[in-house]
Amino acid sequence: MNEADLVLVNGRVLTMDPARPTAPGLAVRDGKIVHVGDASGWTGTEVVDLRGRVVLPGINDSHLHACGYGLHRPPFCLDVALGSIAEVRETVAEAVRRAGPGEWIRGTGWNPGRLAEHRMPGKADLDDVAPHHPVVLQDFSGHTTWANSRALELAGLSGEGLLQHGDQGLVQGLVPPPQGGMVRVLREVLAELNGYGITSFTEPGLGPGGGTTFAGGMGADVLSAYAELARAGELTARVSVLGLPSGMSGASVEDTAAYLADLPKDLDGVDERVLRLLGVKVFADGIPPTETAWMREPYPSGAHGSLCTHGATDAERVAELDEILRLVHLAGLQAGVHVVGSRGIDAVVEALATISREHPRHDARHYVIHGQYASASALATLGELGYGINLQPVLQAMESGTTRDMFGAEAAEREWPARSAIDAGVLTACSSDAPVTGPDWRVGVAALTARDGEGISLTEALGTYTVAGARQDFAETWKGTLGEGMAADLFVSGATDVEEVVTAPVELTVFDGRVVWSGA
């Protein structure tokens, strides 16, 4: 009789390995899968009768600001993803009634494209309901903060109450840290993520450039909190980290060189399969709703946006970007580049191609983050280089109307190009970008399969949340699929048919061979 720690029987295991796509069960010992197939002859400390249910590899959300997400949810933050400025005012007023004297009021989620008043909000909308409490309300994208007069006063600022990109830190940096610190935040977030079947994620930007972003959720001290949990055996997901030398605006060679010369020491003694610094996050441009993504096509205002690297001209900003990426490449690290606009993406891809040619390096796996308006030629180059793109399908579903109004129907049909990227051989991973959207991967898979043109199949969509994430992590040899010798990271869906996984609940999550969440 074969013995294991955990045995799953009588189900449908989707291995995500084309060599052996399905199996009725599997067995786990010492954190690894030791058998895939008929497991009825195995005994285990725990035996789960799947009763026909579907098993999948653990979800890898390959772009998830986990700490920022936690800080942007109750009890740390108000939910202001509401349909009008009037509703936001009511929510803030109620928070003020409950708050102590002078206490900061934080909120997140408002979307300028969904406000019934059809205008941008400002400090005057908050001042009468919160005259003595500083209020900071992050928009859904993380790129704009709406503040009242009291918050602006404390920051030494004037203006109408809307701060964008790096300027947000002037008020965000004044918000006190949460009680219990970042460790408490991460514990709560990890439990929630496990409930979605998530066993791996990329924390895309922790470092000196993020200390005032997402209320400190992208700061350097967050890495220390992750390390503390990892050493205590409390980190119930595998975390890949991108360092963040510079913030959302003004990425510079100087910041990058200083960061690379003194990489974080927090991870000494931590298991690299649990927590690892993989690369560097670079903000190359902004986003279309604020007209800060660098586009070839004109915005309704006639502007085109620009790169957000240092420099007074487009040429200077391109040169700064090129050198930043060269430094990361030569340091042997992975570059994850936030770039959205059509012209910005071309600039990033051209830089990566030149660097790859001039400084050959085996399997660098640099990637474009978002890549909303990637051209066919840019995708072809990424595919040839063996590089990747990280897409957010829920954002596409949320914002397609806004971008259609900005650039027309044709541009909206080709944005977030999942089909084109896969066909071009680009490593195509999908993610939530939480807290910009929620971390429920099922919504993302549904969005990917519902599209015409750039839509993909269910199997391909599931692959973008499992196998592709593992490849982005340089970890496809030991996670992302279910086979003998692979990490025992998996979840049990309530579905008995594969087509149902996008609507069925997650019922059991296993990380490193142990059950970390159960819906029972």
Image (cartoon, rainbow, N blue to C red):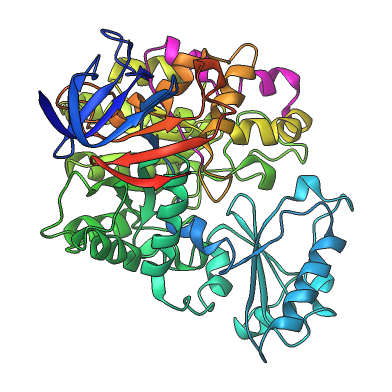
Q: Quadrant of residue 353?
A: top left
Extreme-right residue of the structure: 117
Place of residue 241 in the rendered image (x, y in percent of width and height, measured from the top left): 30, 49
The residue closer to the viewer here, 294 or 136, is 136
For the point 19% across and 43% down, the residue is 273
Give 47 or 174, whichever is nearer the viewer. 47
User: To which quarter of the image does residue 424 belong?
Assistant: top left
In the picture as drawn, the residue positioned furthest to the bottom comes out as 101
Question: Total number of numbered labels?
Answer: 0
Question: Is residue 251 placed above or below 494 in the rendered structure?
Answer: below
Please determine whether, in this image, residue 479 is positioned above or below residue 242. above
Decide if residue 133 is in sight here: yes
Quarter of image, res 326? top left
How far from the left and from the top, in percent, is residue 395?
61, 36
Magenta residues, start to end: 407-432
Q: Is residue 381 left or right of residue 33?
A: right
State the residue at coordinates (48%, 38%): 339
Q: Residue at x 25, y 23 (%)?
A: 26
Tell me if residue 372 comes above or below residue 425 in the rendering: below
Residue 426 lies within the magenta run = yes
Foreground of the two, 314 or 501: 501
Does the rendering let one see residue 310? no
Q: Which residue is located at x 42 percent, y 45 percent?
A: 518
The image position of residue 331, as x and y in percent, is 17, 45
Residue 252 covered by magenta stretch: no
Could you tell me residue 132's position as x and y percent?
74, 88
Could you tell whether 477 is left or right of 12 in the image? left
Q: Is residue 211 left or right of residue 80?
A: left
**From the viewer's perspective, is residue 319 above or below residue 389?**
below
| Quadrant of the rendering where the N terminus is positioned | top left
